[in-house]
Amino acid sequence: MCFKTYQAIAKNRRVNSDRLEEARLAANDPLRIMVAPTGALRSKRDHAALPMTPGDIARTAADCQAVGASDLHLHVRDANGNHSLDAGLIQECMAEVAALAPGLRIQLSTDSAGYFEVTAQLRVLQRVVPEAASLNIREMARDEAIASRLYRFAEAAEITVQHILYGPEDLRLLQDWRARGIVPDSQSSILCVTGRASPFLAGRPEELGRIASALRGWGGEWMVSCHGQHELAVAVRAIGIGGHVRVGFENNLQRPDGTLAADNAEQVAAVALAAHRAGRPLFRAPTRQDAQRRAAG
């Protein structure tokens, strides 16, 4: 065999070895399925089952938890159906979710949706102090000084931060801010968005190879979401290489065949089934019953 043939064989062995290692690590890392049922922009006109009121969101959260969701990505709407960062509305919705879906981790979206400045995003975290929050680094970059205060507040308040990234330039900015101390090292969770909302571009599973390669050595938990009907295919790929998954009507309303999904719970259930088939366990938050059993025994 020629030298190039030996090189090709060696490369294939390295690739196969990397894939086996990814599969081994994934199997030992329970999958978090986050549901994003509402988003900031869609309405009942887009899908009748899109939840917009606190009661609807809470019932959707409970349905999704029952089929495998561990987390809720929470957007709230005002009386006119518009995206809101009103602390009172958020706390009302969180209370309803906690009552119907105890143990489900609630991640507050700080999405500006084109309406809110970084100061408003900091203010809502200070007033609500959620267990977890998502931060769009492109939005944070509008005011680096306020963003630095926001990240520091979140660290002091023990808010679990997830950085939302839309492309490699966002990761480079996050790495720069981390190196400069703007983002604390403890805030290492990432959501990588595949595809885009406007102009619409469907995400595809082929993007996962680039994402996994870029995140090699990052050291934190990473999750993916997908715009469009390839959401499940993207999820399946992420499950196999150690990522976590966000699904729901915020980014996608469709099944893989292009027909409308019945509801958010259908999308969560499809990901849970894919994880089962791949041999990857689901993350399960301790419940009140677990605590009672430990106390009794």
Image: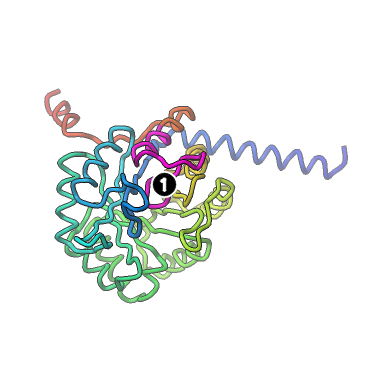
Q: Does the magenta portion include 256? A: yes
Nearer to me, 260 or 133: 260
Identify the secondary structure beneath mark 1: loop
Residue drawn at (22%, 41%), measured in percent from left and top?
59
Direction left: furthest residue: 296
State the image coordinates of residue 203 (x, y, percent, origin top left).
52, 51
232 is higher (above) or lower (below) than 175: above
Residue drawn at (41%, 48%), measured in percent from left and top?
221
Quarter of the figure with residue 185: bottom left
Residue drawn at (43%, 48%), measured in percent from left and top?
252
Quarter of the figure with residue 182: bottom left
Compared across the picture, whether 168 is left or right of 295 comes to right
Nearer to me, 47 or 256: 47
Quarter of the figure with residue 186: bottom left
Nearer to me, 230 or 98: 230
For mark 1, does the 10 Å Cα neighbourhood hold few (<14), some (14 to 19), or many (20 or more) residues? many
**Residue at image mark 1:** 253
Compared across the picture, whether 78 is left or right of 5 comes to left
287 is higher (above) or lower (below) than 39: above
State the image coordinates of residue 166 (x, y, percent, origin top left).
47, 60
250 is higher (above) or lower (below) than 176: above
Residue drawn at (26%, 42%), measured in percent from left and top?
61
State the image coordinates of residue 8 (x, y, percent, origin top left).
77, 42
Would residue 216 be seen by someone viewing this image from the given angle? no
What amino acid is at disc 1? Leu
Would residue 74 be seen by someone viewing this image from the given angle? yes
| Quadrant including the N terminus | top right
| Quadrant including the C terminus | top left
State the image coordinates of residue 107 (x, y, percent, origin top left).
28, 52
* Span shown in magenta: 246-272
